[in-house]
Amino acid sequence: MAKVWIEAALNGPWGRERQPGIPVAVEEIVADGRAAAEAGAAIVHVHAYDASTGRQKDEWEIYARIIEGIRAKADVIVYPTIPLAGSDYASANAQARFAHTAELARRGLLELTVCDPGSCNFLRFDEAGDEAAGFVYQNSMADIREGLRISQECKLHPGYAIYEPGFTRLGAALADATPGLPQPIYRFMFSDEFAWGFPTKPKYLDTHLALLAECAPGAPWMVAGLGVDIRPLIAPAVARGGHVRVGLEDAPWRTELTNRAWVEQAVSAIRAAGGEPAATREVRAALGHRA
């Protein structure tokens, strides 16, 4: 029986005006993280906020409280985001953008990290007629190399969000050129609401997998996305040996499901497809560390 990793992405950069159910305060994020772990998630991904404004705030001290709070009750892998380059709260350079990651890793709190190997245009389909809408999600080569440097030095597995197929090619090439880099995890990003990448159809998953087989054969991968109901791809992912990410960061805006409910639905779909959710120790063993 295939062991399938479930990752729960709890909140994202949206704010409650777009995703009302997201946890914002540290205590709320910790509670949702524990609930997701209890429901079957082995990996939890979080964004930290200034609770007074509801805006993202990437300080290592906030992330440390979140990670330690979740792990106090659940043996689960927890990892943070990085500032959204191109936004008004992003750091000015690569070292500053990854400063919280480096500090959390130095303190032994991280196993995975975010390092997205490419840039792309972000625009929702319903905003296509608005000339003021949209932005460029920026990951310069300096930023990517800094993320990989920290991953190499601190033995973190870089998480590659694959918004476009070229991200796979660049990410694999950089991994091959970085001696001692732990195995990257490829997250194929699908969307129903954003005009990038592919829609949630198995034929497009097969396209991603064909390219991955050429660039990084045997690398772990999962189906994920933003503004997406990923459930139609869970059974195809299980059948093809992949993993699954769900949660309020990824879900269509204003979803009525909670993070726990998204994980529970993923568990049911995985089992219906003949798989079984992996325990955290099984994820660590598959990645070859801290088994």
Image: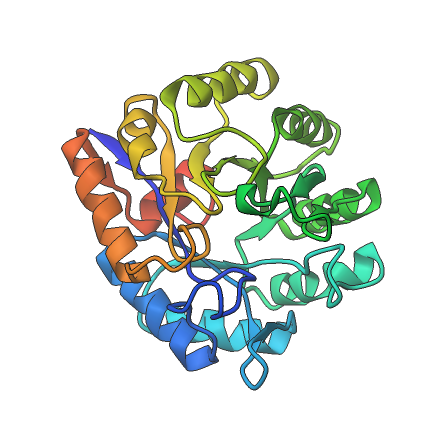
Q: As displayed, is residue 249 above or below residue 185?
A: below
Residue 251, position as x, y percentages in the image: 40, 51
Between 243 and 280, the one nearer to me in the picture: 243
Q: Residue furthest front?
A: 129
Q: Based on the displayed image, in which of its 4 quarters is residue 212 positioned?
A: top right
Q: Residue at x 48, y 73 (%)?
A: 66
Q: As displayed, is residue 221 above or below residue 217?
A: below
Residue 88, position as x, y percentages in the image: 75, 66
Residue 24, position as x, y percentages in the image: 47, 75
Q: Residue at x 17, y 37 (%)?
A: 271
What's the coloring here? Answer: rainbow
Query: Is residue 63 something one can see in this rendering?
Result: yes
Q: Residue at x 43, y 23 (%)?
A: 205
Residue 93, position as x, y percentages in the image: 84, 58
Q: Based on the displayed image, in which of its 4 quarters is residue 161 positioned?
A: top right
Q: As displayed, is residue 193 above or below residue 275?
A: below
Q: Residue at x 65, y 30 (%)?
A: 167
Between 152 and 127, the one nearer to me in the picture: 127
> Which quadrant is the N terminus positioned in?
top left
Q: Based on the displayed image, in which of its 4 quarters is residue 122 positioned?
A: top right
Query: Is residue 288 something one can see in this rendering?
Result: no
Q: As displayed, is residue 35 above or below residue 86?
A: below
> Taking 204 as reference, is 282 left or right?
left
Q: How many marks?
A: 0
> Taking 136 as reference, is 183 left or right?
left
